[in-house]
Amino acid sequence: MAEKSFKYVILGGGVAAGYAAREFAKQGVQPGELAIISKEAVAPYERPALSKAYLFPEGTARLPGFHVCVGSGGERLLPEWYSEKGISLILSTEIAQADLASKTLTSAKGEAFKYETLIIATGSTVIKLSDFGVQGADAKNIFYLREIDDADQLVEAIKSKPNGKAVIVGGGYIGLELSAALRINNIDVSMVYPEPWCMPRLFTAGIAAFYEGYYANKGINIIKGTVAVGFGANEKGEVTDVKLKDGRVLEADIVVVGVGGRPLTTLFKGQVAEEKGGIKTDAFFKTSVSSVYAVGDVATFPMKLYNDIRRVEHVDHARKSAEQAVKAIFASEQGKSVDEYDYLPYFYSRAFDLSWQFYGDNVGDTVIFGDSNPTSATHKFGTYWIKDGQVVGAFLESGSPEENKAIANVARAQPPAGSLDELASEGLAFATKL
Ligand code: FDA
Ligand code: NAD
């Protein structure tokens, strides 16, 4: 089969790929120099929409509405944008083999793609219950959510089971966002997760208590401290029930599983240095192999602010790491350099009429402030994380854009916390006065 050659290839067509493409154009990439190879059938889009407005019965998001870079208020890159710039968008093409020594990628269909510089932007895949051998986990209407095809299948199932019952397995991002989305579709929702409270990777018990109370008021049945160990199915192979480890059995027409992601690094095993489950990079997202970069979910990079190396599975970093890598590639070609990546972690989520933002590091002591009563009409609350006497992380539910900016500034500046009692009573004013 014919071989195609490009100066630059981005492997993956998700968020990082889209933002990288925009930066390539800004840097003056020439027609024919850049290709994006993606197993998805559509041009890069803002993945966060899939667990939110894509699933809503009203105000539904559909492509081309949410192609990158609308999620950060930027220009929407339609498929035509790539052709106008002479960027090859090679879609529905899964790379099955990557040979970094010969700088060749080979697709599942046997096409070969050569590159001079490669950006790995393969993102994450879902962890499946069948990976742990959960019995019946391959029944129909058990869904995972990563790509637009997954979302389309879920939308079909929601339509075909009006007023049905859903069980959401997992209490992380997917669990919380999907429970809300299904409830909004008038589905009877139960959530199951093993931990004592939801989103334990980030939330304190105090933060989680608000969301659990709020979800319960929306009619969501929360079952904690147990896991799904099996699924029943009818004669058509469709899921009918979820068996829990504590012996309970929940009826289900739809199951959504969100038990974590896994960075897609398998193509590069043994060819590139890895760390903390990802591909190890420097502050310019360059890997241990010269002319190979890794960005987004797959990159384990130096987090300058904390003198640590980390991997981040969130959209803000996917966008910024992609831009940093492309700037660094162009600078190095011109014998110049760019500043080291100096990232302030930023995570957010939205569900129902709730919206939270978090900046910084969630380590050390915590104080909660504001109105965190889930039944209050004026709920607005937050949490600070304090390490070695300094505020290092800040969380805010229902903040205004200015207030969210203020907590971001706190997390970046790491001011002295003073007395924790005073910090708690001062609350948001501590951030807004900074
Ligand atoms: P991303 O997953 O976006 O893209 C990877 C691309 O590579 C995909 O197109 C994939 O098909 C392709 N690919 C992989 N292997 C390939 C191969 N072998 N050959 C060809 N193509 C291949 N974050 C946040 O901060 N706020 C939020 O609200 C959300 N919401 C959210 C919802 C949902 C449903 C998901 C799944 C994730 C989020 N996230 C999020 C996380 C965020 O979307 C995620 O961190 C970024 O999409 C990561 O961007 P990447 O480009 O690294 O991977
Ligand atoms: P996650 O890591 O946020 O949550 C996984 C959850 O799975 C855990 O909190 C736990 O409750 C649960 N769990 C683990 N094993 C289980 C088991 N056997 N049975 C039941 N529950 C179990 O992962 P996720 O929610 O699946 O999200 C996948 C990826 O998508 C992540 O990279 C995440 O960052 C990303 N994402 C981000 C956002 C956002 O930032 N707003 C939204 C959606 C998805």
Image (cartoon, rainbow, N blue to C red):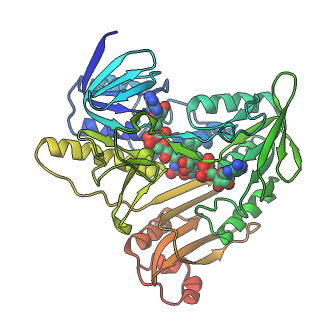
- Give the x, y percent position of residue 136: 78, 33
Vertically, is 316 above or below 430?
above
For this orientation, the residue located farthest to the top is 1
Q: Is residue 76 left or right of residue 367?
A: left
- Give the x, y percent position of residue 148: 57, 31
Q: Residue at x 23, y 57 (%)?
A: 339
Q: Is residue 46 left or right of residue 120?
A: right
Vertically, is 260 above or below 107?
below
Q: Quick one: quadrant of the N terminus?
A: top left
Res. 296 visible in picture:
yes
Kindly indicate the quadrant of the structure image that contains residue 56: top right
Kindly indicate the quadrant of the structure image that contains residue 111: top left
Between residue 343 and residue 374, name the one nearer to us. Answer: 343
Res. 176 visible in picture:
no
Kindly indicate the quadrant of the structure image that contains residue 166: top right
For this orientation, the residue located farthest to the front is 270
Q: Quick one: quadrant of the C terminus?
A: bottom left
- Give the x, y percent position of residue 164: 84, 37
Vertically, is 51 above or below 317?
above
Q: Residue at x 47, y 26 (%)?
A: 39
Vertically, is 411 above or below 194?
below
Q: Residue at x 75, y 31 (%)?
A: 141
Number of numbered labels in the structure image: 0
Q: Residue at x 29, y 55 (%)?
A: 283
- Give the x, y percent position of residue 277: 46, 49
